Image (cartoon, helix red, strand yellow):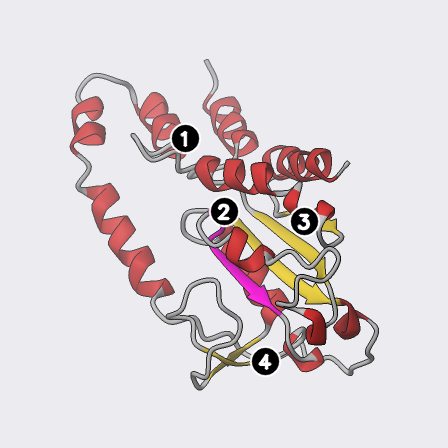
Amino acid sequence: MWDALIFAAEGYAKAAGRVGVCIATSGLGDTNLVTGLADGMMESIPLVAITGQVPRCMIGTDAFQATPIVEVTHAITKHNYLVLDIKDLPRWVGVDHGQRGRGRGKGGQTGVVIKEAFYLARSGRPGPVLVDVPKDIQQQLAVPDWGSPMSITGTAKRKQARQRLSAMSPSLQHRQMYIGPLQLELAAAGRAPGTGLLLAQPGEMALKADRAGP
């Protein structure tokens, strides 16, 4: 079931041009998301996967359904979080974003984990982000503070670097000599050569073509 849900989230993301969301239980549920997360990473599809986890006191004890999904998905997600405090859900405190995929850092940065997850999923090169929530965290109550500012080191610099690289792309410069303005616009809005990077949604490309006319 969960392996179908992650691909349903992919389909929604492609069709709607928004972040696809999938929720799965621990153990069998989150491991069934792996193929879809890997596909989303390779195809640059914005996804947020929220997974269940055993209580914090049982993590690392080989308990029933205690899959270390953060470690499992380290290489197939843009970023992932292990929530160790109820306050981390609305407000992520003390995260070192230099350590990819780890929610246990002791750096001084703050942000909003859910807000960050959706931002990271759709910014730059889109891709999947995973948020792992232990059972005892799920059963707690908290007053959320959704207004906390995000502080994600390096995101702006990486975006500027990608823009400069795209502007200097020899393949696009070469194509510009042989194809018309509309075709160039559609090519630029599609996938970056050799990267699988989806730069614009198919619906957006179709609207541009429709406005341009025959």
Of residue 23 and residue 117, the one placed in the foreground of this image is 23
Q: Residue at x 67, y 80 (%)?
A: 85
Distance from the alpha carbon under mark 4 to that under mark 3? 29 Å
**What is the three-letter code of the residue carrying label 4?**
Ser
State the residue position of label 2.
127
**SS state under label 3:** helix
Distance from the alpha carbon under mark 2 to that under mark 3? 17 Å
Q: Vertical placement of 5 versus 95: above or below?
A: above
In the image: residue 75, left or right of residue 159? right
Q: Earlier in the sequence, mark 4 or mark 3?
A: 3
Q: Residue furthest toward the front?
A: 62
Of residue 150 and residue 52, the one placed in the foreground of this image is 52
Q: Callout 1: few (<14), some (14-19), or many (20+) C-alpha neighbours within 10 Å? A: some
Residue 135: image quadrant is: bottom right
Q: Which residues are magenta?
A: 76-82
State the residue position of label 4.
148
Q: Indicate the position of residue 59 as horizontal and vertical percent values.
A: 65, 69
State the residue position of label 1.
190
State the residue position of label 3.
30
